[in-house]
Amino acid sequence: MSSIAYVTDENMIEYFRLCGIRQMNFWRLSSRKEFTDFQKGDLLFFYTRTPHSRSRGFVGYAHYVSTQKLSLKGMWKKYGTSNGYDSEQLLNEAIQRAAKDRPVPEKMNCLYLNDAVFFSNPVNPNEVGLKISPQLESYMYLDQEDPQMTVRILRAAEQKGIDIWSNSQSYESEDIFKSDEIRHQLTLIKDGMPADSWNQKERTRAQKLAAASGLEFIRGSKTDVFELQKDQLILSLPFVSQEKDKPYLVREYIGKVMMYRLMLQKSGLRMPAVRFQILHDEEAPEELLMLTTNINEEH
């Protein structure tokens, strides 16, 4: 998963927060610096000046949905106050201020975001060991040099708490925040694992089993899927093998399950109960069934 720090207008973000707006449109005057590694569901952190201070911090985030080009009138017609202003005139004035002496393009790049979460207090980049240039004008990727950065920002925000006012407007904010922490942690765990030893035929079978499950893929994986429920995380891993390499792949599967379990325990997240499920197209080996049963019964 990718995350970016996005320089945003503090007045617009405060408008979203006070109005409890969870879906929003961010407009960009310049298209010179395009996103190259940003997909639906990735996190855009609001990096803005904090109250009573000229310094910037992270005050919340939202999930990226899509990008499109729209005119001012098109933006207002489609998104209205989800542009961050009470009227089309105020939106136009904000665009003019941002453009300064430059001409405003006929159409602007628009980023549509949803499921916004606001923090009770800003997270300063220094708190999480992140250096951001004071000259940053647009955005920067957060995880390119340190894959743990997004998780550290979310952890710091968790300690401060979710903004009480915006959360009162929508009871889902805390659940969304917790789910995002778990998703990012699963991605980090998966990225740290060695590659599976399947041959091509086995890998194809595993991918089909995962796709047929209808569950959510861990980002970056084509085989490991999960389901987040209110009180539990169900982690489903496919087991496939040919008879000749079954003993080896059984041991590898057990190691994979134990690694997920250990790393999730060490993550320090407010984790719901974790349950493991075997995805298989033939009868699963007895030792794997016993392993998952024993682990699941521990909770």
Image: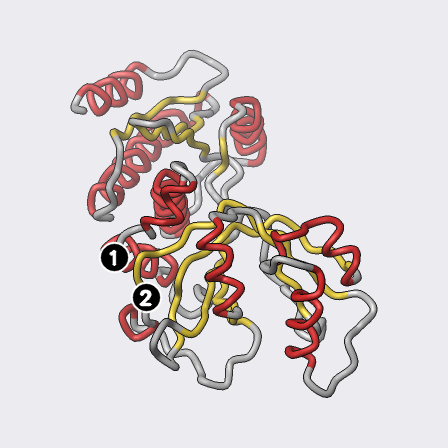
State the residue position of label 1. Answer: 160
Q: Position of residue 93 (x, y in %)?
A: 68, 72
Residue type at mark 1: give it.
Lys
Which sits in the foreground, 237 or 57?
57
Cβ atoms at labels 2 and 1 below 8 Å apart: yes
Q: Residues within 10 Å of mark 1 (few under 14, many from 20)?
A: some
SS for callout 1: helix
Is there any visible trace of residue 180 in the rendered image?
yes
- 222 on left or right of 167: right
Residue 190: in sight, yes or no?
no
Q: Is residue 232 left or right of residue 169?
A: left
Q: Quadrant of residue 76?
A: bottom right
Q: Which residue is mark 2?
A: 123
Residue at 34% x, 27% y: name it: 230
| Three-letter code for the amino acid on which mark 2 is drawn | Val
- Distance from label 2 to label 1 (Cα)? 8 Å
Name the image colouring.
Answer: secondary structure
**Residue at position x 27%, y 22% from top?**
292
Residue 122 in the image: x percent, y percent? 33, 65
Front-lying residue, 285 or 219 = 219
The answer to which of marks 2 and 1 sits earlier in the sequence is 2
The disc at residue 226 is none
Indicate the position of residue 206 as horizontal and vertical percent values: 52, 29
Q: Is residue 227 left or right of residue 207?
A: left
Compared with 65, 26 (above or below) is below
Q: Quadrant of residue 293?
A: top left
Residue found at the very far left of the displayed protein: 298
Q: Residue at x 30, y 62 (%)?
A: 121
Other residues around mark 2 within 10 Å, as few (<14) / some (14–19) / many (≥20): many
Q: Indicate the position of residue 65 as horizontal and vertical percent values.
A: 61, 48
